[in-house]
Image: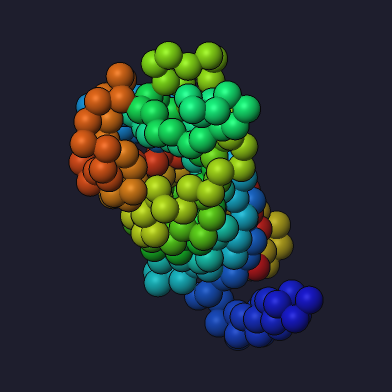
Amino acid sequence: MKKIYALGLLFIAFNLVQAQDKSFQLGFQLSPNISWISPDSEGLENEGSKFGFSYGIIADFNIAENYSISTGFTLLNSGGKINYPDRQSIDVVDPNNSNTTIKQEFGGRTDADIRLKYIQIPFTIKLKTNEIGYMKYFGQFGVGTAFNIDAVAEEEFSYPGGNGTIKNEDVDYKDEISLFRASLLMGIGAEYNVSGNTSIMFGINFDNGFLNILSEDIYKEDDNGNGEGGRSESFKAINNSIILNFGILF
């Protein structure tokens, strides 16, 4: 509750400043997105995309009539589906006692439906047209810096000689995901002036990741479970998103 009050006070303070200085606008943004993970290593495969939703505070610094520096604070929900070689410990019947089970490691492949959550701070430049009716159109370009705060996956692990697959739900993937993510942000959109300094904003962005999101904490094995059985730093993949933005600026 205290955090909500703090955000409310921050919003009021910014609007008081903005009332005296029209070169600054603060607002809120809601952003549904479709994201996916693009492998850049042999053995990793893309298995599909995910639908996510993001929201946050946006701030535009209008440095000239048709130019703005845009930043903010966004809670970004992203992810994707990948398939990769893996090793897992499986319960098997103890060969010395058929009434008990023991843990045994097997090599195979894992299908992982990964949900990622980031705190993202974008830095972009908006190039705006003159007002046409009540509308201003803009192009946007910049970078996004993000920090991973949660990573969870639904897994299906298959291995040679196994009966079917082993399913694991809500698996903690923080060890498999790098803390920092960086991306190029490119987009187009429009602002509709409602009254005075208040505008409704909508647009579409491509969030193109350019840093590896996988950490070294993934096993390097082939499809038959052959390999050193150790962790690998060679697996690389980036996370991309197509984002629809809806917001209001004051």
- Residue positioned 70% across, 57% down in the render: 194
Decide: is 225 above or below 13: above
**Which of the pair 143/39 is nearer the observer?**
39
**Which of the pair 164/203 is nearer the observer?**
164
Q: Splitting the image into 4 quarters, where does residue 186 fall?
A: top left
- The image quadrant where one finds the N terminus is bottom right
**Which of the pair 219/47 is nearer the observer?**
219
- Residue positioned 35% across, 28% down in the render: 107
Visible residue check, residue 150 = yes
**In the image, residue 188 lies at what x, y percent?**
45, 43
Judging from the image, the colouring scheme is rainbow
**In the image, residue 124 lies at what x, y percent?**
38, 59
Label total for image: 0
**In the image, residue 43 lies at what x, y percent?**
27, 26
- Residue positioned 70% across, 81% down in the render: 6
Left or right: residue 105 compared with residue 22? left
Visible residue check, residue 112 = no
**In the image, residue 39 lies at what x, y percent?**
31, 32
- Residue positioned 38% across, 24% down in the render: 108
- The image quadrant where one finds the C terminus is bottom right
Farthest right residue?
A: 1
Q: Splitting the image into 4 quarters, where does residue 21 fall?
A: bottom right
